[in-house]
Amino acid sequence: MKRILISALALGLLFTTESCNENKKVESITKEVTFKKEGELKLMKAESDSLIATIDIEIAEGEYETQTGLMYRKSMQDNRGMLFIFENETPRSFYMKNTEFSIDIIFINADNEVVSIQKNAKPLDQTSLPSEAPAKYVLEVNAGLSDKWTLAAGDRVDWSKQ
């Protein structure tokens, strides 16, 4: 009987410890991520090459940064964006899982031309938001900015890393 009681206590302690460890993992994953300026991006009208806007960008390169994107953030300032850089140009599709604020998703080809825009993507929605043409880069900015800037397919971007 004593052995059963000791075994039950040890098993209970093991589950309690494991549960605490899982809670710590969840806390660290859901901690809000802050913006880190890694470059600057300029948007220009196609027909006149005039400057539309200049924003600070955080750059998502590599699998982890690309998968995470703007997840676990509450907001972003209007003068900021996230630029995703991919190795090849192909049709792209994004979704809003764990993204808590609405954004415009701007798809850009290898020639730095806007090929399509998904406007006002809904927070936390897992619906696929595809590009209308192959894209090598994707720029995420606050919802409504592409309309404010009158950004359209064919407009250009120029960006640099810090």
Image: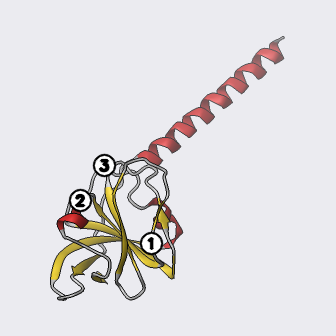
Query: In which image quadrant can residue 45 be found?
Result: bottom left
155 to the left or right of 84: left
Q: Which mark is residue 155?
A: none
Question: Which secondary structure lies at badge 3?
Answer: loop
Q: Which mark is residue 132?
A: 1
State the residue at coordinates (19%, 76%): 54
Closest to the camera, between mark 3 and mark 1, is: 1
Q: Is residue 107 above or below residue 64?
A: below
What is the count of numbered marks? Answer: 3
Query: In which image quadrant can residue 56 be found?
Result: bottom left
As measured in the structure, the alpha-carbon distance from the residue carrying label 3 to the one carrying label 1 is 28 Å
Residue type pointed to by label 2 = Gly
15 to the left or right of 122: right
Characterize the local packing of mark 3: few (<14), some (14-19) or many (20 or more) Cα atoms within 10 angstroms: few
Closest to the camera, between mark 3 and mark 2, is: 2
Residue annotated with mark 3: 74
State the residue at coordinates (25%, 78%): 40
Question: Which secondary structure lies at badge 1?
Answer: loop
Disc with the residue nearer the chain's start (2 vs 1): 1
